Image (tube, rainbow, N blue to C red):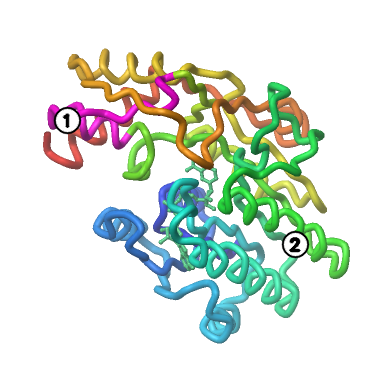
Amino acid sequence: MKILVTGGCGFIGFHTSKALLERGDEVVVVDNFNKYYDVSLKRARAGLLRGCEIVEVDISDYEAMEKVFEKHSFDKVCHLAAQAGVRYSLENPFVYEKSNVKGTIVLLELCKKFKIKDFIFASSSSVYGSNTKLPFSENDRVDNPISLYAATKKNNEEMAYAYNHLFGLNCVGLRFFTVFGPFGRPDMALFLFTDAILKGEEIKVFNNGDMFRDFTYIDDIIKGVLLAIDSGLKFEIFNLARGEKVQLMDFILSIEDCLGMKAKKKMLPMQPGDVKGTNGDISKARKMLGYNPKVSVKEGVKKFIDWYNEYYSV
Ligand SMILES: NC(=O)c1ccc[n+]([C@@H]2O[C@H](COP(=O)([O-])OP(=O)(O)OC[C@H]3O[C@@H](n4cnc5c(N)ncnc54)[C@H](O)[C@@H]3O)[C@@H](O)[C@H]2O)c1
């Protein structure tokens, strides 16, 4: 298969592209290498994607993206590019409009124009917003996004639904839950905490540590993404989580144990836009995709720290 991966030099996009290449698919990556976080990490990921074309382009640029579609005849599109981050969306709303809303419309339009059959795209656990019923299920209403980021992800699911309805484009949306692992994002907790602890700096612990997340290891997520790519389903939304809630303080303890160092914790109030907890019901993905996450948080944290130490020559 020939697959377009958008955001292919991002954390999840890189691992997805690598896995597709390893199993023999042809991959074309588009990424705009924006400066939201350390661009050298994106370049390093790009350097490891041997045998695939990497096009430096913004997905919101219709003409430039049209050229990519004209040059290649894609079987499927796996759309992982987005402006991520809840906190950043409070200060930079228009980047979210450009990358997440317009960028997704451009891709949907080009899928329609070039008669692409399957569109697999990243959504987020953040669409559950201030819901309190746990675990979060795909059947729950998601009408309470509490950040602009979350609202754009919900919007992506709705736009995909409309394109499926109007033009028969197969769409599978994946609600990822706090993904972590090697080559992970420098703006996310595991990276920030590891970095600060090693430098002897304070870590910021929001809501005084009274938070929990369904931390999901990257290899499990990638298995889920590949199953979704292969599924050929007409329109479905899936939670891709580990299916367990882990308290933030226990997560920090795993990092401390692995590093053999104690964190200096700065306890802070809840940040606007953040949710207290996430936990995904993964029974639908198990049943319909055969998704079966295996890696524990402890194991995953160790794999991340091993990678971090090697990559940054600690
Ligand atoms: N990592 C998580 O825990 C998580 C959780 C929920 C949802 N998601 C979603 O999964 C997807 C991948 O996330 P990630 O963690 O790999 O983030 P990431 O920031 O590492 O990857 C996104 C990539 O997209 C690229 N990009 C952004 N805007 C672009 C644009 N306009 N044109 C072209 N390229 C652009 C970036 O340069 C980056 O390389 C995103 O859609 C994100 O919203 C991630």
Relative placement, left or right, of 16 versus 227 is: left
Q: Residues within 10 Å of mark 2 (few under 14, many from 20)?
A: some
113 is higher (above) or lower (below) than 177 = below
Image quadrant where residue 263 sits: top left
Main secondary-structure element of the magenta-colored stretch: helix
Q: What is the quadrant of residue 129 in the picture?
A: top right
Q: Residues within 10 Å of mark 1 (few under 14, many from 20)?
A: some
Left or right of 203 in this view: 123: right
Q: Give the residue at mark 2.
A: 159
Q: Secondary structure at mark 2?
A: helix
Q: Is residue 208 magenta?
A: yes
Please state which amino acid type lies under the numbered disc 1. Answer: Glu
Q: Element under label 1?
A: loop
- Which one is in front, 127 or 175? 127
Q: Position of residue 218 (x, y in %)?
A: 46, 36
At 70% from the left edge and 78% from the top edge, which residue is drawn? 114
